[in-house]
Amino acid sequence: MFYFMGAFMTMSRLQVGFWGTILCCSALAVARPAEGGYHLLKKYELGAAPGGQEYWDYITFDEATRRLFVSHNSEVKVVNADTGAIVGSIADLKRVHGTALVSELGRGFLSDGGADEVVVFDLQTLKVIGHIKTGGNPDCIIYDPVSKHIFTFNGRTNDASVIDPRTETVVATIAMGGRPEYAVADGRGTIYDNIEDKNEIAVLDTRTNSVKTHWPIAPAAEATSIALDVKHHRLFAGGRNKVLAILNTDSGKVVQTFPIGAGVDANIFDPKSGNLFVSVREGILHIFHEESPDHFLAVEEVKTEFGARNAAYDAKTQRIFLSSADFTPAAQPTPDQPNPQPVPISGTFRLLVYGR
């Protein structure tokens, strides 16, 4: 030991720098959270959609009640996240997309794209207590804690409806400059929304109900999923052209990209672990890790199930929830249907739970 230390002290500055770098990198490697090992833990069967036509979209997780709100065509299944038990449903909808929860009011809000409205329900009883007309085909729905308003992003009318959840009225309509898709709020008065047909991000000010700017996301295109690292000012936009773009929200510039699978529909960033989860329809859960704000690594590709494109995350258990079903094979192409898709089989809808 003495000989080693003596020799180390006679090293050149260049040698000391080299070994210092090695020791520093080793320390970082030890400090980094363990990655990998995500696998299927459980499957929960959720039954057939009313009317027999399977369709699903967003999943919303309520940390306070440990409940999942799972969209399922004309209903929302409410599921105990720990046991998989169905605790209720909100039914008699047209074609539901997403759920936003306002716990302080004891109310939930559903975007019913088939009815061009938001459906209000009681969080305790799950009973429908109101209907609010919106723009055409409200899809993504989120709650902004700064303005204390609900925002729906309406795919057919290319606008956003701003709703006061206390009065259950639309207080503003915002032109989005294209077809809006998935959106995320930063909790500081800004919402970032994918403009799918323009390959842009719209930056919306929730205090003035106006769009401040648009950012291009090239080489990503047709973005349908989005997530945000609030602390490090990084935005993640998943493109249907199979490219994930990471943007700096201070400048709006793309700082890194990754290839992803086909049919992306959900991005989730966990600030505690620094992990970014991206789920795609072809049956892959991509996991990336934030080494630094400008440097992410692809650490794992988890094989899931075809159709498992929508996701929710439980930060407490670090588990991912995905929804999917069995599918028939795609039909043969025809002039009218040159790209036929597999069709989900009625009665096979289920919740998949992945974790370590």
Image: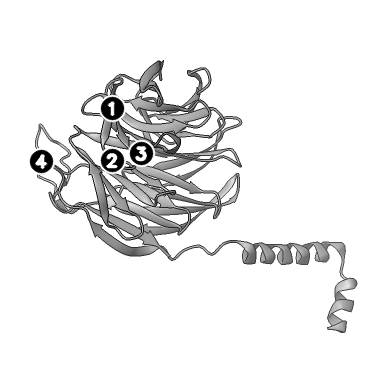
- Residue sitting at 54 percent across and 34 percent down? 187
Disc 3 versus disc 4: distance between alpha carbons?
Answer: 33 Å
* Circle 3/circle 4 CB separation < 8 Å: no
Label 4: few (<14), some (14–19) or many (≥20) C-alpha neighbours in 10 Å: few
Question: Mark 3: which secondary structure?
Answer: loop
Q: Which percent across, then down, holds residue 243?
A: 41, 42
Q: Which amino acid type is shown beneath numbered disc 4?
A: Gly
Q: Residue at x 53, y 21 (%)?
A: 207
Mark 1 is on which residue type? Answer: Gly
Q: CA distance from mark 1 to mark 4?
A: 23 Å
Pointer 2 with pointer 1, Cβ within 8 A:
no
In the image, which is nearer the foreground, mark 1 or mark 3? 1
The quadrant where residue 107 appears: top left
Q: Which residue is mark 3?
A: 241
Tag 1 residue:
130
> Which label's residue is closer to the chain start, 3 or 2?
2
Report, in whole angstroms, how far the alpha carbon at label 4 lies from the one at label 2.
21 Å
Q: Nearer the viewer, mark 3 or mark 4?
A: 4
Which residue was labeled with disc 2?
126
| 355 up-or-down from 260: above or below | below
User: Where does the image place residue 211, in percent across and percent down from the top left?
Assistant: 48, 19
Q: Name the element at disc 1.
A: strand
Distance, label 2 to label 1, CA atoms, is 12 Å
Q: Is residue 304 visible?
A: no
Rendered image: mark on residue 51: 4
